[in-house]
Image (cartoon, helix red, strand yellow):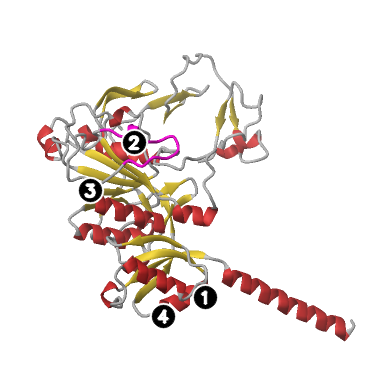
Amino acid sequence: MNPRVILLMVVTVVVCHRYTAANTNQERKTYIVHMDKVVMPPEYSDHRNWYATSMESVSESPEMLYTYENVIHGFSTRLTVEQAKLLEKKHGVLSVKEEVMYKLHTTRSPEFLGLAGRETMFSGLGSGGDVVIGVVDTGVWPGSKSLDDTGFGPIPAWWKGECKNGTSFGVSNCNKKLIGATFFSRAYEATYGPIDETIESRSAIDDDGHGTHTATTAAGSTVTGASLFGFAKGTARGMAPNARLAVYKACWLGGCFGSDILAAIEKAIADRVHVLSLSIGGSLADYTNDVVAYGAFKTVSRGIFVACSAGNSGPGPFGLSNVAPWIATVGAGTLDREFPAFVVLGNGKKFRGVSLYSGKPLPESMVPIVYAGNISNTTGNLCLPGTLPRGKAAGKIPVVSE
């Protein structure tokens, strides 16, 4: 090959590499900046001006997402890797940490735990509606019967929270039970762009269901005659049905971003909640890199009880989330209730399983069994949506892989 062609190829590769590296270096990410407020220069009358100047010293187009005063002294901002390194060297800057994304983690429970009928305990958790439980999650669905405010007195005068207007949600959706509802999306939108309101709501309304579930598990009002497709009929209630609720939506369809979570915790502290619940978490990390851990630390220091989920993984210890010693880490357990169903084979063998089928009675005649993996060329063996071809599974019992 011609030496000049080889040289040209080498130069091209080097230029491309440098261009890619430069582009990567210029990509902005969200960082949480922890400041030492004690050393704020005297010429600044307001800490926010100091924060802004610190940003402007490393970026020509600074973008402040949130400022924090209760959980930490500091702010969150969008920076390149190089700008973050420069900012970390500035006087008064304690740390500059790249934001981490977090993930989201029955009528029988009170009875199973031996708490049914113990009205003295429940009244101790706010019979007068004086206890407020804050929930950081995906928001809330205001039409739920579990949010009925019958019997609740006026909202306490000391309460500082609000119900924030937004898409399909407004002040009128709150009541004497649900006394706070707001949302935090700046970090989410800084990463993914403006929220697509055709698929999710830019408000405290729950587009997922997870937030409504966790909030009403904690403090849902008593609902008699509740069931799931006719199963498990009984009285549904939260563990503290007389407590009031405040929801802080920091989790969206694309995930829960650290800056938004920290802003939600900040607001909950300022609003004066008594309990803070977060059913979200990430992988095990140093506490200084975990916004839930250090956000909870400051919350607990204010006299607020913090409860977090242990996660959806396991059973190994590294599957745990939210293990900081100042957090009440809550794991799921197995109830003493099940919904059995039986399959009887042609040879008389009987297999026990579970089912929530509530349709028409099934015929007593024998039905063919088919392995789902043999009738699908995709992932039919896992029975994923849309993987079983029409006609090949109809009228049969598909056997799938666990």
For the residues labelled 3 and 4, the Cα–Cα distance comes to 36 Å
For the residues labelled 4 and 2, the Cα–Cα distance comes to 44 Å
What kind of residue is marked 1? Glu
**Dot placed on the residue nearer the N-terminal end, 1 or 4:** 1
User: Which mark's residue is nearer the viewer, 4 or 2?
Assistant: 2
What kind of residue is marked 4? Lys
Residue 368 in view of the camera? yes
Residue 320 in view of the camera? no
Q: Which residues are magenta?
A: 163-175
Marks 3 & 4, CB-CB < 8 Å contact = no
The residue labelled by disc 4 is: 89
Q: Residues within 10 Å of mark 1 (few under 14, many from 20)?
A: some
Marks 4 & 2, CB-CB < 8 Å contact = no
Q: Residues within 10 Å of mark 3 (few under 14, many from 20)?
A: many
| Residue sitting nearer the eye, 282 or 100 | 100
Up-down: is 126 above or below 33?
Answer: above
For the residues labelled 1 and 4, the Cα–Cα distance comes to 11 Å
The residue labelled by disc 3 is: 273
**Dot placed on the residue nearer the N-terminal end, 4 or 2:** 4
The residue labelled by disc 1 is: 82
- The quadrant holding residue 32 is bottom left
